[in-house]
Image: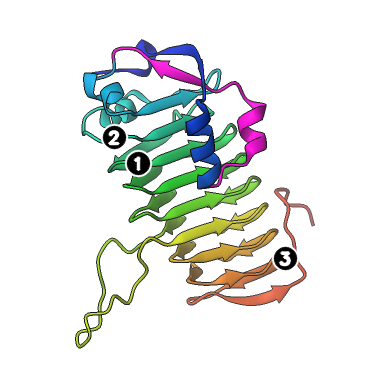
Amino acid sequence: MTTWQQLTRTDDPLTDEHRARLVAAGVEPDRLEAVEWRRMDGPLPSWWNDLGNALYAAEGARLPDHVVEALTTFYFRDTVIVIGAPMDQLTSLLVGGDEATVFLDQRVILTAGEVYCGAGSSVVLHGPLVATRSPVVDARNGGRVVAAGDQLWAAGVYIATDDMHRLEDATTGERINPFGATISIGHHVWLCREAVVSGHVDIGEHVCVGLRAVVRGQKVPSHVVIAGSPGRVVREGTTWSFGDEP
């Protein structure tokens, strides 16, 4: 079993290839320039480097040992993982195939969080981002999840590009539900308790997604409150703050 403590933060910076790949996945170039990302090495399984995988970290960043163990158990290739913060409270980070890209920035806190990134998919979370309890972030089938900074996610938030199973028209065989979708969450977004974001979604800036609201296959403008299932705009011209003043 490989532990994080056994790994060494080398002097090797992001390669140009990996930098370009991260930017293509949605990472803000300024974030890549602001931090000294260095490649991690050590007693990794022989297949890890042989299959072109790379793990980078900022100074002081780390993953729980059970997450490292899971990442080094099942084969995948050409995957890039970048960790910017101590992710001690992360429950799982699973890679489900080749060419996955994961970027968890500095000041990202996913309390009891679960992250899944499938083959050819990407999860990009910019900081600051605080998820208070049990968020699920799931990108698969070439899908992407990109969250800008200044996020507050309440307990039980669920973000998924796909439904994990095919729903089709019984007559034509045409797929009905999303496949390989892109989810973009703008700057300063508050996802309230048990909010669901799935399918092709584009959420603007300064948005509040209400309690148990379902945002699916929608473009949400900036400065609104959205509520209900399916989600709809219930108030315009709004913003929100982390404080709770009268």
Earlier sequence position, callout 3 versus callout 2: 2
Q: What is the distance, in whole Å, between disc 2 and disc 1 at their CAs?
A: 6 Å
Q: Residue at point 42% right, 33% down?
A: 81
Residue indicated by mark 3:
223
- Which amino acid type is marked by label 2? Arg
Q: Residue at point 47% right, 66% down?
A: 200
Q: Residue at point 47% right, 12% down?
A: 10
Circle 2: element type = loop
Of badges 3 and 1, the one in the foreground is 1
The quadrant holding residue 105 is top right
Badge 2 vs badge 1, beta-carbon distance below 8 Å:
yes
Q: What is the distance, in whole Å, between disc 3 and disc 2 at their CAs?
A: 41 Å
Q: Which residues are magenta?
A: 26-43
Looking at the picture, how far across and down is residue 199, in whole percent? Answer: 43, 66
71 relative position to 161: left or right: left
Q: Residues within 10 Å of mark 2 (few under 14, many from 20)?
A: some
52 relative position to 155: left or right: left
Q: Residue at point 73% right, 48% down?
A: 243
67 relative position to 186: left or right: left
Q: Residues within 10 Å of mark 1 (few under 14, many from 20)?
A: many
Decide if residue 63 is in sight here.
no
Q: Does 124 appear above or below 233?
A: above
Residue 77 is marked as 2
Q: Is residue 158 magenta?
A: no
